[in-house]
Structure formats: structure tokens, C-alpha cells
């Protein structure tokens, strides 16, 4: 087992079942492909997935379109689409809970991207346990006190930073590359950027994760509180849109 950081920081361990997990990933992709009636809103980043486009990704609404998993697979290798945070499939939850050992049933999210996709610097308000199923990802992580400034509460992504870190080093950085079979834990509030650096099954980078509520002591952090405020504001805007039919402004990445 490999450990990075301390109990208060990120750490990664190997499940030592890489071969088994890759077989499960193939089965999982086939399972999703067979479920043609289940559509998911897929994010199309276009040039915003490139590591040098931190400011544009952090300050833009990412266009999404509903797709079946079969259609996504047909296009994913040639585009910058990101099958992100997929939870709404009973078959998916049943399969992942049966495949990944847990002390109790969990709600998993599935993340699938082509090689080279970068999710820019951001933090989450929940503890994050990531299971790398296929391919490899490099995580750059910084503690909550790092010299990184979040976007404003009124921006599309208030938990992101527009700081371009692809060619600089920030104090206290931890860099971890996870491979199929590795499990990474990230405490709430830790800044991180993620890049797919090696492909696996079907030339894709595949991972699953579980978000868990942070300890009470972490919830009083102003950075986490501001994200909760932004999430509540975003939910109110969405309810207003549904009730009135009003359109929320969307920035088309093709014009950036």
C-alpha cells in the first residue's frame, strides 16, 4: 500500500486487483451500452478540456446534450466529451456496489473521458473516494490554505479557480498518478486538477467515486460554506427556469 500525505491529506492505495477490475470495466461498459433507454447529459468541453484553457473552463457554462451510452462510445474517442457524474442508473449502482467492496451500499458516480481531458483546478465540499477502473489519471492537489483564489459566487463554477497551473508549481502541491486498481481519497476543500494520462478499456479513462459528507469540523470552513451558498443559488435558478420557461445564458465553447 502506498500512502501520500497524512490523515488530513490525500492518500492512495492499491487494491492489487488490476486485472479483475479491468474485466469488470469491460462488463460495465457493455452493461451501459445495452441500456439504450437511459440517456445522460454529456458535457462537451471542446477546447475547454485542454490544460491551458483554465480560465475559459472555470468561467464558462459547459454545453451538455442527452446521449445514450452507445452513442457516447461511438463519438468519445474522437471528441472532448465527458461522461461525468453518472448516477441515475439502477443497473450501474447495483453493479458497482457488487464489484467494489463497501461496508454499506453507496451511491457511486461514473466518470469516463478520452485521453488528455483535463478537469481544471477546483475543490469539492464533500470527501471524495475515487476508484480508478481503467486507464490512468494524474491528480495535482493542494491543501485548502494554498494560494489559490476561487471564482466569484456569481460565476458558473464558484468552486473552480481560473488560475492556470499547467506550467507552474504552487507551494505544498501533491502530485499523484493513479492506475487501474488504485483508490484515492481526497478530503473536502482540497484543491485539485485531474488529467487522463493513459487509456484503458476501449481507449477510455474510466473511474468511479463516492462523495461523503465531511466531518462537522470541516463544514465550518468558509470555502465550503460559500460553495453551499452557490449550490443553493444555482438550485433556485433552476427551479425558476423550470417554472417560467426562462433560458439560462449558455456560452458556446466553439466561439471561445
Image: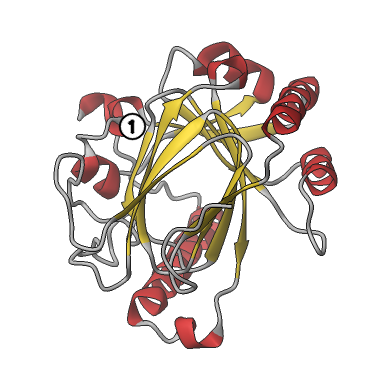
In the image, is 58 to the left or to the right of 114? left
Q: Residue 252: tell me if it is visible.
A: no
Q: Measuring from the top left, give residue 75's x and y in whole percent.
A: 52, 14
Q: Secondary structure at mark 1?
A: helix
In the image, is 208 to the left or to the right of 171? right
In the image, is 50 to the left or to the right of 116? left
In the image, is 37 to the left or to the right of 68? right
In this view, the residue farthest toward the left is 168
Kindly identify the residue that appears in the image at 53 percent across and 35 percent down: 179
Crowding around mark 1 (Cα neighbors within 10 Å: few <14, some 14 to 19, many 20+) is many
Q: Is residue 109 above or below residue 143?
A: above
Kindly identify the residue that appears in the image at 67 percent across and 45 percent down: 15
Q: Which quadrant: the C terminus?
A: top left
Q: Considering depth in this image, is 252 or 53 the residue closer to the camera?
A: 53
Q: Measuring from the top left, give residue 120's x and y in whole percent.
A: 31, 45
- Where residue 201 sits, quadrant-wise, is top right
Q: Which residue is mark 1?
A: 49
Kindly identify the residue that appears in the image at 78 percent across and 24 percent down: 27
- Where residue 46 sits, quadrant-wise, is top left
Q: Measuring from the top left, give residue 13's x and y in whole percent.
A: 58, 52
Kindly identify the residue that appears in the image at 23 percent across and 42 percent down: 54
Q: Is residue 214 above or below residue 201?
A: below
Q: Considering depth in this image, is 245 or 116 the residue closer to the camera?
A: 116
Q: Considering depth in this image, is 1 or 148 the residue closer to the camera?
A: 1
- Where residue 222 sits, quadrant-wise, is bottom left
Q: Residue 186: tell me if it is visible.
A: yes
Q: Measuring from the top left, give residue 231's x and y in whole percent.
A: 45, 66
Amino acid at each position: 500500500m502506498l500512502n501520500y500525505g497524512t490523515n488530513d491529506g490525500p492518500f492512495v492505495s492499491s487494491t492489487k486487483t488490476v486485472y479483475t477490475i479491468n474485466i469488470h470495466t469491460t462488463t460495465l461498459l457493455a452493461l451501459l451500452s445495452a441500456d439504450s433507454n437511459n440517456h445522460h447529459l454529456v458535457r462537451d468541453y471542446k477546447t475547454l478540456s485542454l490544460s491551458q484553457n483554465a480560465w475559459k473552463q472555470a468561467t464558462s457554462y459547459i454545453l451538455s446534450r442527452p446521449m445514450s451510452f452507445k452513442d457516447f462510445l461511438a463519438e468519445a474517442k474522437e471528441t472532448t466529451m465527458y461522461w461525468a457524474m453518472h448516477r441515475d442508473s439502477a443497473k450501474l449502482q447495483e453493479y458497482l456496489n457488487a464489484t467494489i467492496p463497501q461496508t454499506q451500499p453507496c451511491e457511486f458516480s461514473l466518470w469516463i473521458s478520452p485521453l488528455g481531458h483535463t478537469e481544471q483546478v477546483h475543490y469539492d465540499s464533500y470527501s471524495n473516494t475515487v476508484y480508478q477502473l481503467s486507464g490512468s489519471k494524474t491528480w495535482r492537489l493542494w491543501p485548502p490554505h494554498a494560494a489559490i483564489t476561487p471564482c466569484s459566487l456569481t460565476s458558473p463554477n464558484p468552486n473552480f479557480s481560473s488560475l492556470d497551473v499547467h506550467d507552474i508549481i504552487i507551494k505544498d502541491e501533491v502530485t499523484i498518478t493513479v492506475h487501474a486498481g488504485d483508490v484515492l481519497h481526497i478530503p473536502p476543500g482540497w484543491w485539485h486538477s485531474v488529467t487522463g494520462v493513459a487509456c484503458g478499456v476501449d481507449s477510455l479513462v474510466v473511474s468511479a467515486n463516492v462523495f461523503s459528507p465531511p466531518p462537522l469540523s470541516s463544514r465550518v470552513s468558509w470555502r465550503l460554506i460559500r460553495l453551499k451558498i452557490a449550490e443553493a443559488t444555482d438550485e433556485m435558478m433552476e427551479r425558476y427556469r423550470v417554472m417560467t420557461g426562462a433560458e439560462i445564458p449558455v456560452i458556446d465553447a466553439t466561439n471561445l
